[in-house]
Image: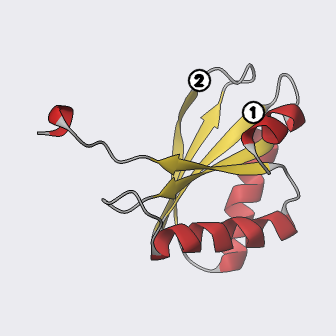
Amino acid sequence: MDIQEFKHHLTPYTAVLGIDYGAKRIGIAVSDLLQTVATAHSIIHRETWAKDLASLQKIIQEKEVRAIIYGLPLQMNGQEGDMAQEVRNFAAKLAKEIPLPYNRRSEERRVGKECR
């Protein structure tokens, strides 16, 4: 789903869940109900799929989440690598269990003077 379609599916006065996927941990951020700012919520220490799913379901229910956005990591050259594919796979698997609209946002790498 592209970003415009994703925005169209956002329900007013509900939260958006941000997922920073990792092989050992999943970083979680949750937006406010006006969807103007997101703050760090928690870190899920990966165990089994069932436990990871239960943790995510609990947060989604408690925080009135109605959409998910994933950080899509890029390599230093700006290209997608193996981890980006893992994020895509995780997102697809989670969508089968939790049917909320979702999108992925590339984590752009900074280059140039500001990084020197």
Q: Is residue 64 visible?
A: no
Instruction: Indicate the position of residue 41 as horizontal and vertical percent values.
Output: 55, 41
Going 83% across and 22% down the picture, which residue do you hit?
13
Q: Nearer the viewer, residue 81 or 48?
A: 81
Task: Residue under label 2, please give it.
Answer: 37
In the rendered image, the vertical position of residue 44 relative to residue 32, given as above or below: below
Q: Nearer the viewer, residue 64 or 23?
A: 23
Instruction: Quote the CA–CA distance across marks 1 and 2.
Output: 10 Å
Pick out the residue farthest to the bottom: 48
Going 62% across and 80% down the picture, which residue do you hit?
48
What kind of element bears circle 1?
strand
What kind of element bears circle 2?
loop
Q: Is residue 9 visible?
A: yes
Going 68% across and 60% down the picture, which residue do you hit?
55
- Side of 92 relative to 82 (left or right): right
- Side of 96 relative to 114 (left or right): right
Pick out the residue farthest to the left: 116
Instruction: Indicate the position of residue 60 as horizontal and vertical percent values.
Output: 76, 47
Q: Amino acid at mark 2?
A: Val
In the rendered image, the vertical position of residue 30 relative to residue 109, given as above or below: above
The quarter in which the C terminus is drawn is top left
Task: Residue under label 1, please give it.
Answer: 15
